[in-house]
Image (cartoon, helix red, strand yellow):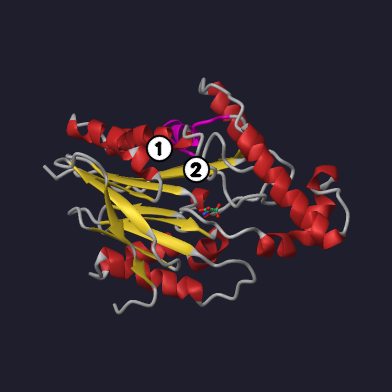
Amino acid sequence: MADAVIIGSERSEIGLPAGMDVLRRGGSAPDAVEAAMHRCEDNPNDHYVGTAGLPNAQGVVELDASMMLGSTRRFGAVAALRDYPHPISVARAVLEQLPQHCLLVGEGAALFARECGFEKAELITEKSRTMWREQVAWSTASVEGENTPALSGDHHYRANAVELIRRLAPHAEPWGTINIIALDSSGEMCVGVSTSGFPYKYPGRVGDSAVPGAGNWCDLRAGGAACTGRGELAMRGGTARTVVDLLATGRDPGGACQIALRDAATLPDAFRSELRALALTPDGRHGGAAGQPGSTYVVMTTSSTEPETHPRRSLTAPG
Ligand code: ASP
């Protein structure tokens, strides 16, 4: 019997107790990840995941999510999924019910969600619509000197994408995709990732959260890892896979995340390059790293009464 543990990125503390309840009752790692992630996807105050997630450039919420199992390396994901509030569950259904595929996108993902019987919901909220209007309208207007943002067509976004993303207001509070990694009492590990993606992204853009090896990787021989932050860097760096490869060489979880992120940070990138990683080993050791100072992650073991916050290692710290 392994000692069950569940860890998550910033803002997953709202979901971890539900995941730990599952694990304490002897439930499975994917059940724990799904239970925890639903709480995060339903959080109306979180603008980076599920309902209330920030929309794409045209004001439409498009969600990416994935789930990977450590024992088999089975992987299920959906990307650019509209109208379904729990993309983690649709990703799990791809993993379990569509074994010939790993990743469904857009209309096909929505068709599959409907066929599986998932409920649709309105994903944009008043607050997230207002944020989109203010940010996108402000950015495009200030670049082009006119007040016709992406509403009128993607050409505005294409023309101004670099400038728009550079000029977005800095995040004052913890932000980004939700990562949750669970180890159950049978020793199975599961990594779940769910996100509304880069705010105001180009319609159809898919980030690292849905891509195996980039934002999610799990291999019971070494451990599991997941990323949040600038997904294009995690995709170009193969960052989650790199973390797990480093665990396999005997690196500790924090050190493995740090080295993988340092590698991603060497990639030329005109946009903001903050990336964070999190890792868990099959014997329950955990750690994280971040390019952004002050970043944390949360952990619950079977004896925890509430999620404990741990610092992530900074890229400049020794190690
Ligand atoms: N990693 C996500 C993506 O690139 C974004 C985020 O974490 O905020 O889609």
Q: Where is residue 96? Give x, y as percent.
A: 41, 33
Residue underneath mark 1: 37
Badge 1: few (under 14), some or many (20 or more) residues near its Cα, within 10 Å? many
Q: Give the mark, 2 or 1, whose residue is nearer the N terminus.
A: 1
* Dominant secondary structure (helix, strand or loop) of the stretch shown in magenta: helix
Q: Is residue 52 left or right of residue 163?
A: left
- Label at residue 103: none
- Label at residue 65: 2
The stretch in magenta equals 84-101
Please name the amino acid that badge 2 sits on: Ala
Q: Is mark 1 within 8 Å of ligand 1?
A: no
Q: CA distance from mark 2 to mark 1?
A: 10 Å
Residue at (62% x, 50% y) in the render: 199
Callout 1 secondary element: helix
Q: Is residue 241 left or right of residue 247?
A: right
Marks 2 & 1, CB-CB < 8 Å contact = yes
Q: Quadrant of the N terminus?
A: top left
Q: Where is residue 305? Give x, y as percent.
A: 19, 39
Q: Quadrant of the C terminus?
A: bottom left
